[in-house]
Image (cartoon, helix red, strand yellow):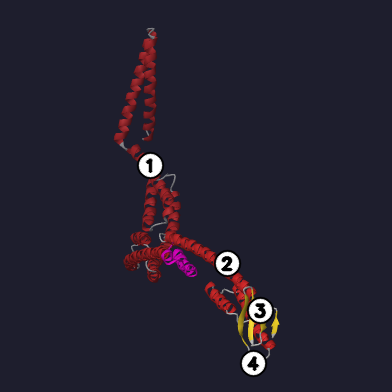
Amino acid sequence: MSSDPWGRVDETGTVYVRTADGEQIVGSWQAGSPEEALAYFERKYEGLVVEIGLLERRVKTTDLSAKDAAAAIDHLRTQVDEHHAVGDLEALRKRLDALVGTVESRREERKAQKAKQSDEARQAKEKLVTEAEELAVSEQWRSAGERLRALVDTWKGLPRLDRKTDDELWHRFSHARSAFSKRRKAHFASLDAQREDARKAKEKLVAEAESLSGSTDWGATAARYRDLMTEWKAAGRAQREHEDDLWNRFRGAQDVFFQARGEVFAERDAEQQENLTRKEELVVEAEKLLPVTDLKAARAAFRTVNERWEAIGHVPRDARPKIEGRMHAVERAIQEAEETEWRRTNPEARARAAGLTGQLQDAVDKLTKQIDTARAAGNNAKADKLARELEGRKALLDQALKGLEEFGG
């Protein structure tokens, strides 16, 4: 018979293992010596030790599920309980029991971690939903659309929650996206309609602008082009593919008209500037007639100058008041000379002036005598009153005498 601290082999070849509950039969060995029998079952024990060690490391260092770990522990425990190995089986049971505690602890940790991750994912998804619902009412169509697409990508990267919670949050998230898409679609549909209306309106403006490009009614046409530009701005923008072409046609029509007008105005300005030079020469010639000494000659000379003046066309508008004012001043001087001559040579007017002078002279003589009489009688008050009246009559007499002088009298 052979034995060691954990087992023995009896004379019949039966192998035993020592446990806390006494010896347990391990098996029977007939093929060799008892030492070989113990060595064989000791190797089986070592095999169990290695397997348990490997399982311990897997539980501690890998993501082995609690279910798979429990199944592996049960499998090893069955082998230990069946006593098919020689060694400290109780130590193996204790290691397996400890491993059960480790697995359970890991299960609770994973459960807590999963719950934490689920709560974080729920909060993250709720945050995404809240932002999506805020974006759903935005009118920043481009940036809001891009942000919603980014939120979808973020959502896909988050873990799923329990079906009820996940479905509810996804429904809100999807509804917000749909609401934004509907509003954006309606906005751009309205915008397309507005742009189509703008295109039609601008087509009409272009057609009128092109029809006016050959007009020579410079003032009225230029005013109409200004009105057309105002209408163009009020019409809004057409579709991008039409806007530039319409604008180029509209602007091109105006350019044709204003270039033609500019050329005509430039030619007109040059002609009017030349007219101004010629009229300035005539004004200088007319001004040499002043002062009038020979009315008849001055009148004839001015008539000749004026005829040449009238034959000359327009001058620049800003120079017109000054040049015409100088010419009119000469004309007025000649007219005043004519009026003076007429009064001097008019017999009736001269007779009236002489009569008036005589009447005033008589009145002055009469008042002088009355004053002398009043003072001789000592009536100074009456004399003073008559003296004031005399002063007035003398003033009128002086004016009448000056008028009479104009007639050479």
Q: Nearer the viewer, mark 4 or mark 1?
A: 4
Q: Using residue 351 as the reference point, say whether residue 149 is left or right of it.
A: right
| Magenta segment includes 149 | yes
The single residue placed furthest to the bottom in the displayed view is: 31
Q: Nearer the viewer, residue 36 or 351?
A: 36
Could you say whether the residue bearing mark 2 is in a helix, strand or loop?
helix
**Distance between the alpha carbons at the discs numbered 3 and 1:** 156 Å
Q: Position of residue 391 (x, y in %)?
A: 39, 21
Image quadrant in which the C terminus is located = top left
Q: Could you tell which of marks 4 and 1 lies nearer the N-terminus?
A: 4
Q: Could you tell which of marks 3 and 4 lies nearer the N-terminus?
A: 4
Give the residue type at disc 1.
Answer: Glu
Q: Position of residue 289 (x, y in %)?
A: 43, 48
Give the residue type at disc 2.
Answer: Ser
Q: Which residues are magenta?
A: 140-166
Q: Which residue is mark 4?
A: 31
Q: Nearer the viewer, mark 3 or mark 4?
A: 4
Q: Nearer the viewer, mark 3 or mark 1?
A: 3
Give the residue type at disc 4.
Answer: Ala
Res 105 label? 2
Q: Could you tell which of marks 2 and 1 lies nearer the N-terminus?
A: 2
Q: State whether residue 299 is above or below residue 401.
A: below
Q: Nearer the viewer, residue 50 or 193?
A: 50
Q: Could you tell which of marks 2 and 3 lies nearer the N-terminus?
A: 3
Q: Which residue is mark 1?
A: 336
**Disc 1 crowd, CA 10 A, few/some/many (<14, 14-19, 20+):** few
Q: Which residue is mark 3?
A: 87
The answer to whether the residues at label 4 and label 2 have Cβ atoms under 8 Å apart is no
Q: Nearer the viewer, residue 154 or 281?
A: 154
Give the residue type at disc 3.
Answer: Gly
Q: Nearer the viewer, residue 345 or 308?
A: 308
